[in-house]
Image (cartoon, rainbow, N blue to C red):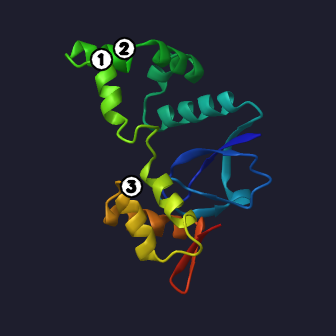
Amino acid sequence: MYAVVGCSNCGALWLVSDPDSSKTAQCQRCGKTHQTRKLKRFFASDDRNAAREARAALLAKKHGDADAFADVDHVADLEAQLDESGIDDAEYLAGVGLDPDRVAAAGDVSGGSSRSRDKIVRAAVEQADRPTEDDILAYAVDHGVPADAARTLLEKLRQHGEVSESGGRYRLL
């Protein structure tokens, strides 16, 4: 089941999947945590696309665009049109005078698949048994992540409960 719910703090509308099984939901706009059972449900359906369509209609009405929304295709149809429209990356690069193969090769500096900064910081935590922040930062810097960015990512991982820190030592949870 999917429900379109609204934030009592900022008025944002979002989808909650299986609202009866979760106790809380957090507004993506303002960050307020709500008890799911107390959230106002504007629409509920077993079909995710129907719930998305209802949310889109509510947002259009909220912003005074209900008439224009009525003339637009279903959200799922719009996504399909979006996927079919435009040009792909290779066509764009060739159109501006760049060789798509050389651009792809230039992006592959490791000789294999490149890793995101997040994955590099996670690997830094995994690479040693209970590493310190300095160990993690050194590993990240050696793998192309700036120290400040690595420190920020490590803190975000800790805040989200994906990494724990005890006595200056880190581990993935």
How busy is the neighbourhood of tag 2: few (under 14 within 10 Å), some, or many (20 plus)?
few
Farthest front residue? 111
Which is more N-terminal, label 1 or label 2?
Answer: 2
Horizontal side of residue 10 vs 23, given as left or right? left
C-alpha span from label 2 to label 3 = 33 Å
Residue type marked 2: Ile
Q: Which residue is located at x 66 percent, y 28 percent? A: 49
Residue 27 x/y as whole percent: 55, 55
Q: Which residue is mark 1?
A: 92
How busy is the neighbourhood of tag 3: few (under 14 within 10 Å), some, or many (20 plus)?
some
Q: Nearer the viewer, residue 161 or 18?
A: 161
Residue 62 x/y as whole percent: 48, 38
Residue type marked 3: His
Q: Which residue is mark 2?
A: 87
Label at residue 143:
3
Residue 67 x/y as whole percent: 47, 21
Q: Nearer the viewer, residue 170 or 41?
A: 170
Q: Which residue is located at x 36 percent, y 59 percent? A: 142
Which is more N-terminal, label 3 or label 2?
Answer: 2
- Dot 1 falls on a residue whose secondary structure is helix
Callout count: 3
C-alpha span from label 2 to label 1 = 6 Å
Task: Determine whether 73 is above or below 112 in the image.
Answer: above
C-alpha span from label 3 to label 1 = 30 Å
Q: Are marks 3 and 1 in contact (CB under 8 Å)?
A: no
- Dot 3 falls on a residue whose secondary structure is loop
